[in-house]
Amino acid sequence: MNAVSTASPSSRPEILRGEGLPLFEAVTPEAVREHIPELIEELERELGALESSLEQSLAGQQALSWESVMDPLQRLGERLRWSWGVVSHLNGVCNSPELREAHAAQQAAVVQFGNRAGQSQVIFAALQHLNQQRESLDGAQQRILAAELRDMQLRGVGLSGAAKEAFNSASQELAELSTRFGNQVLDATNRWTLRLSEQEDIVGLPISLLEQLAQAAREAGETGATAEQGPWLMGLDMPRYAPFMQYSQRRDLRQQVYTAHISRASGHEGDALNNWPLIEDILRLRSEQAQRLGYANWAEVSIAAKMADSEQAVETLLEELRAAAYPIAQQELTALAECARRHGAEEADQLKPWDISFWAECLRKESFELDSEALRPWFPLPQVLDGLFALSERLFGITIEAADGEAPVWHPDVRFFRIKDQGEAIAAFYLDPYSRPGSKRGGAWMDECLVRSRKADGTPVLPVAYLICNQSPPVAGTPSLMRFEEVETLFHEFGHGLQHMLTSVERPQAAGINGVEWDAVELPSQFMENWCYDRATLMGMARHWQNGSPLPESEYAKLLAARTFMGGSATLRQVHFALVDLKLHSQWQAGSGVSPEQLRRQIAANTTVLAPIDEDAFLCSFGHIFAGGYAAGYYSYKWAEVLSADAFGAFEEVGLENEAAIQETGRRFRNTVLSLGGSLDPKEVFEAFRGRQPRSEALIRHSGLVAV
């Protein structure tokens, strides 16, 4: 024990250092296999020593303090979070068979230690003892303590004997199944390609996509591939998939690509990658875990730690949105069919899912004279970053400076930035912007590298974030020219990063996003998306990458007019996902004779206006709920959107042209929503910013549903 605590971090293997910015290249599969068991062993010993000390204090009826219970417990957890966090991070952004295998081999031990700490009767008794003197604790400490007591109960501290053994065994199995689920989605996405070699295969495709497809072909060995002459290699990663579905005039190829995408990892056409059995196992195990903990189902377990009071409260919000969105989505589908009919398309009378993006793009051009593809040259990544950073300075009084070369990175594309407040460094972040289909999982996310805290000697630890996107990469000397949706995604993830980095809370259990109820955690991210449509922000960053000319005013007006285009369909889609997630975790039962997919299709009857095709296996790639943290919590996006739209409403009310008022409101947002983290109930945090509780009117208006 003493030898462990006295070794300086710099003299230890990198993966065990437990503090500072990671040296990613040293976190190899060999290091994971060799040193994670060593770390778990050390943590086991230290946890045992802490339990012995607390047991003596409890037996001798000695007073316990925050410093003797919570601080050492947090330091133990942080060492595991730091080391295993780096491994998990690299598994997501630099995935390889060797790293995947090393991660899988150690996962059970990591879960086992989490269970061991989470079910410690001595620790739980010490926390209860602390709770008896909660009046001596500040508000943040009381929130942290209440959350820790609740979480220990949800981790099975009240179980014993066979029930405890079964709970721990299921926890390990669930962790393994989730990892396998995500890996199979990644593999299925990467494995499928379609080689296009004739000019007729690429009719309608924009040059930016052709350049990407030619680059993919070159990377696959077709060294002579060009955007003009091909061949072109199509794939299922979003930077290739989304524009193909929007622009390809070959309906047969759209059908082929859509079907491949929607059936990923489902065993379609005999594919060995099949997530259906994993889905049933995950849902069954979660249901059993809930019952062991005394809950009726996993949805109750999930909502126990959320801002929403009950499943009924969630369903009420979702039904309010569904009822508003459904008739508008029906009107939108009719408008697409009429557009197709005007163009003499034979599919006009029977549109299919692979027609929607194509005809929506066509109708957008007709209705608003807005061409999504033609906008890309005005949104090169470097300028979008400049605009995002200028907005952050305007609203929150911070400056953001490039610090490339000052921190180790895991890939040459990764950038490093520092955030300063009045010249003083207060945080930093990594940005990994581009899609890498072979080794990086899809989607976009923010994760914690370092959490704001103080070391035992009082030295401050500044927060550092990982910001990960999967946008179109640079091609042949052209910078990454972003689709407007990619701009919104970057702003969204940066909002998460701001809450992590601008926190003023120094207790790490409540700093940044820690301790924030999951259905409130999307507030800052969705709030930031609104600024993509703010005139000063958008016109400040939209400059043509070649000649620096600003985005024409007419194009900005079209963007604004088209903001709620297909808004009913977009809302209905999210409601469908949220309800499916909720019902799978509250109603579905193994052995009921109804499969998860059959239940999903029952729900689709009034949450979709176009029935899923037979091959639709969307659940098999629904990583948010089967490989991420959103199980029975996908509704959080809509729940938090009520908060974020209402928060942005505060800026609209003072006038977006009123610079002094905007800055004052921005500072208030920073000092409440971004600063207070999990130290206060999110209802109180929102009220501190807004002066009242949230209302849904702004969301209904922003979503284009106001007429209903």
Image (tube, rainbow, N blue to C red):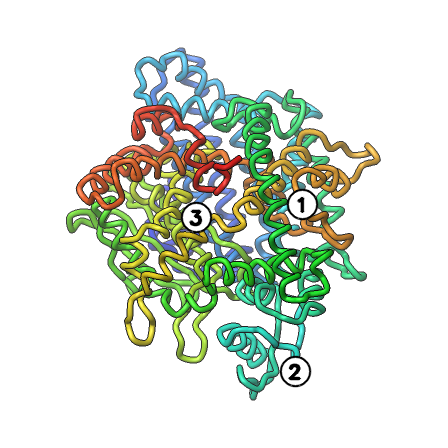
Residue furthest to the front in view is 342
Q: Amino acid at mark 1?
A: Val
Q: Is residue 633 visible?
A: no
Q: In the picture shown, does residue 13 fall above or below 284?
A: below
Q: Amino acid at mark 2?
A: Ser
Q: Which residue is mark 1?
A: 609
Q: Please report whichever mark, 3 or 2, sits nearer to the chain's N-terminal start.
A: 2
Q: Secondary structure at mark 1?
A: loop
Q: In the picture shown, does residue 367 fall above or below 248?
A: above
| Quadrant hosting residue 594 | top right
Q: Secondary structure at mark 3?
A: strand
Q: Which residue is mark 3?
A: 447
Expressed as whole percent of the image width and height from the top left, the position of residue 108 reads 61, 44
Instruction: Please name which of the two marks, 3 or 1, marks the residue nearer to the observer.
Output: 1
In the depicted view, which residue is nearer to us: 61 or 374?
Answer: 374
Expressed as whole percent of the image width and height from the top left, the position of residue 380 reads 37, 67
Q: Total number of numbered labels?
A: 3
Cβ atoms at labels 1 and 2 below 8 Å apart: no
In the depicted view, which residue is nearer to us: 234 or 290?
Answer: 234
